[in-house]
Image (cartoon, rainbow, N blue to C red):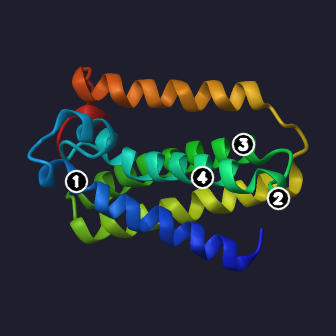
């Protein structure tokens, strides 16, 4: 994809993700808003800040620009989303283990790096992938959406769901 397209995507995802960090509180803890926004300071809830902006961008791009998208668009986007989320989790816990402390400025930088990494992977799949995998991509995105909705209301007793 073109640099300009990626820059616009990066800005859209980043700005919306930053806003989603605050929208739950701004909405007076509205449960519907909480499905899409971070409702606490857990790692899981912060993954929504990457997932939902990228999912919304996917829907917008498919609706308005589907004829311009490569055949493997949805698969590339899905792998980008998964890669970005895995990157954020892996680097976050690695840095916390090394540093022994959680720094907000590092977490913010990590979010932007995760968005960039997601777009990098997506673009790599565009160039090198040939498979469409529409059903698998759709299933993964629906499953992740359901997981975010479910675990917002009923978080398991696992570390990734605990507030940091």
- Residue 125 at what x, y percent from top left? 79, 51
Residue identified by numbered label 3: 74
In the image, taking residue 16 as reference, residue 134 lies left or right, namely right
How far separated are the C-alphas under marks 4 and 1? 21 Å
Disc 2 residue crowd, few under 14, some 14–19, many 20+, Cα 10 Å:
few
Residue identified by numbered label 1: 23
| 118 up-or-down from 76: above or below | below
- The quadrant in which the N terminus is found is bottom right
- First along the sequence among labels 2 and 4: 4
Nearer the camera: disc 4 or disc 1: 4
- First along the sequence among labels 4 and 1: 1
Nearer the camera: disc 2 or disc 1: 2
Residue 90 visible in image: no
Disc 3 residue crowd, few under 14, some 14–19, many 20+, Cα 10 Å:
many
In the image, taking residue 116 as reference, residue 65 lies left or right, namely right
Nearer the camera: disc 3 or disc 4: 4
Dots 2, 1 in contact, CB < 8 A: no
Q: What residue lies at 20% left-to-right and 42% top-to-bottom?
A: 39
Residue identified by numbered label 2: 68
């Amino acid at each position: 994809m073109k640099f300009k397209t990626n820059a616009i995507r990066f800005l859209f995802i980043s700005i919306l993700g930053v806003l989603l960090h605050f929208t739950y509180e701004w909405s007076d803890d509205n449960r519907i808003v909480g499905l899409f926004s971070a409702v606490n300071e857990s790692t899981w809830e912060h993954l929504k800040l990457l997932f939902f902006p990228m999912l919304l961008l996917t829907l917008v791009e498919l609706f308005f620009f589907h004829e311009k998208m490569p055949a493997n668009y949805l698969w590339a986007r899905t792998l980008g989303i998964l890669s970005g989320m895995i990157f954020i989790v892996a680097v976050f816990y690695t840095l916390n283990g090394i540093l022994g402390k959680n720094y907000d400025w590092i977490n913010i930088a990590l979010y932007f790096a995760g968005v960039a990494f997601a777009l990098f992977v997506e673009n790599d799949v565009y160039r090198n992938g040939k498979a469409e995998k529409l059903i698998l991509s759709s299933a993964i995105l629906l499953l992740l959406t359901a997981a975010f909705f479910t675990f917002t209301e009923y978080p398991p007793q696992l570390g990734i769901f605990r507030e940091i």
